[in-house]
């Protein structure tokens, strides 16, 4: 359940530094504090991935009047994307079969 590269103890301490008056139960800390930090981390990670996918012309983005950006598949690149996904899946299967990289380890 730990965030890769960051022990749970550090996540708890980081939350308390941001919210020094906070107190909670085991269940509350697990459900709210750690979840909040993981969502923040996931948002930053997804934002970076979306930026890269748009820069690589694999996704299209459009900003709406409400200021939010919407992302979708670049249909002109669909064949290329499908090929990439097949190759990536085969690569993961090969790495798992040879034991060189565990499935949980990152692929950039």
Image (cartoon, rainbow, N blue to C red):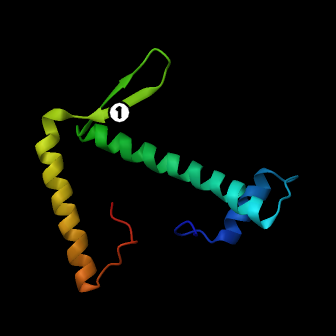
Report the residue at 17% width, 54% height from top. Answer: 84
Question: Which quadrant would residue 2 be assigned to in this image?
Answer: bottom right
Q: Residue furthest front?
A: 27
Residue at point 75%, 63% (across, down): 27
> Most extreme residue toward the top, as rendered?
65
Viewer-closest of 68 and 51: 68
Res 61 quadrant in image: top left
Residue at x 42%, y 18% (from the top left corner): 64
Task: Please indicate whether residue 13 sits to the left or right of residue 61 in the image.
Answer: right
Q: Position of residue 28 (x, y in %)?
A: 76, 59
- Above or below — where is 46 with respect to 25? above
Q: What residue do we see at 38% from left, 67% from top?
A: 106
Judged from this view, the residue extending furthest toward the right is 21
Horizontal side of 5 relative to 65 (left or right) equals: right
Residue 54 position within the rendered picture, expressed as x and y whole percent measured from the top left:
30, 37
- Asked if 106 appears above or below 17 in the picture, the reply is below
Residue 41 drawn above or below residue 61:
below
Give coordinates of residue 7: x percent, y percent.
62, 72
- Residue 51 lies, with reference to residue 31, above or below; the image says above
Q: Quadrant of the C terminus?
A: bottom left
Q: Quadrant of the N terminus?
A: bottom right
Q: Quadrant of residue 92?
A: bottom left
The total of numbered circles placed on residues is: 1
Q: Which residue is mark 1?
A: 71
Under circle 1, the secondary element is strand
Q: Local crowd at mark 1 within 10 Å, few (<14), some, or many (≥20)?
A: some
């Amino acid at each position: 359940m730990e965030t890769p590269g960051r022990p749970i103890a550090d996540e708890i301490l980081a939350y308390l530094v941001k919210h020094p008056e906070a107190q909670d139960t085991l269940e509350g800390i697990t459900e709210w504090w750690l979840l909040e930090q993981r969502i923040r981390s996931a948002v930053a990670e997804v934002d970076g991935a979306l930026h890269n996918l748009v820069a690589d012309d694999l996704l299209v983005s459009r900003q709406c009047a409400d200021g939010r950006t919407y992302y979708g598949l670049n249909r002109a690149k669909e064949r290329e994307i499908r090929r990439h996904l097949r190759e990536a899946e085969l690569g993961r299967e090969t790495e798992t079969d040879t034991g060189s990289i565990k499935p949980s380890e990152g692929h950039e």
